[in-house]
Image (tube, rainbow, N blue to C red):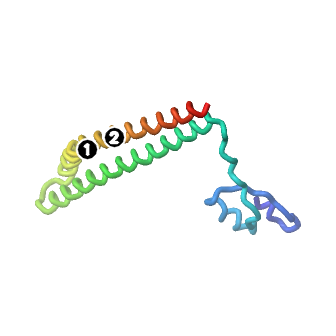
Amino acid sequence: MLLAARPGNGVGVLQSSEAGCPVCRKPGFSDFGVVAQAPASNDPIVQMREAQRQANAVYAAKLMEAYAERNKEIHAAVEAAVKDADANGKDPLVAKRDAHAKATKATEAAYEAKLKQLKAENRAALEAAKKKGAAKS
């Protein structure tokens, strides 16, 4: 990239993501055009697989959200227990261990129910994509 930025080189072609653009601009390159994304396929199998990929991406994001929510609850319980242990002169490490185990067990049923619901939603979305793909072909 630095060789292409030397004086005398009129045009250089670089391709980068949005995050990489500042790196290309630093030696003096500027935006000239944008590479367009390929148009969507009309092939029903390709469309079905794309719909399945999107459904799986939504599922993964919701799983991460559920996991983060549970960990936030557990973390809050642990922090409160450690703070209480410090205030009462008890061992904070024991309080942390016990609070973590207790909060994990307390949130387990709700977490498992949420995962079951998300799995059912994902299964339904995948089946809908499969039926839609089968209907087109």
Q: Is residue 117 above or below residue 17?
A: above
Q: Position of residue 61 (x, y in %)?
A: 44, 48
SS state under label 1: helix
On the image, numbered disc 2 is attached to which residue?
117
Q: Give the left or right position of residue 91, taking residue 19 as reference.
A: left
On the image, numbered disc 1 is attached to which residue?
110
Amino acid type, label 2? Gln
| Residue drawn at point x = 26 percent, y = 53 percent | 73
Location of residue 20 by image quarter: bottom right
Q: Position of residue 40 (x, y in %)?
A: 65, 45
| Near-viewer residue (117 or 69) | 117
| Near-viewer residue (38 or 12) | 38
The residue mark sitting in front, 2 or 1, is 2
Quadrant location of the N terminus in the rendered image: bottom right
Q: Earlier in the sequence, mark 2 or mark 1?
A: 1
Amino acid type, label 1? Ala
Residue at the limit of the structure toward the right, as seen here? 8
Q: Is residue 27 above or below residue 64?
A: below
Q: Give the left or right position of residue 38, taking residue 135 as reference.
A: right
- Label 2 CA crowd tier, 10 Å (few <14, some 14–19, many 20+): few
Q: Position of residue 109 (x, y in %)?
A: 24, 41
* Circles 2, 1 touching at the beta carbon (< 8 Å): no
| Residue drawn at point x = 15 percent, y = 57 percent | 85
Q: Position of residue 132 (x, y in %)?
A: 54, 36
Q: Is residue 10 above or below residue 56?
A: below
| Residue drawn at point x = 56 percent, y = 34 percent | 133
- Label 1 CA crowd tier, 10 Å (few <14, some 14–19, many 20+): few
- Distance between the Cα atoms at labels 2 and 1? 11 Å
Residue at the limit of the structure toward the left, as seen here? 88
The dot on residue 52 is none
SS state under label 2: helix
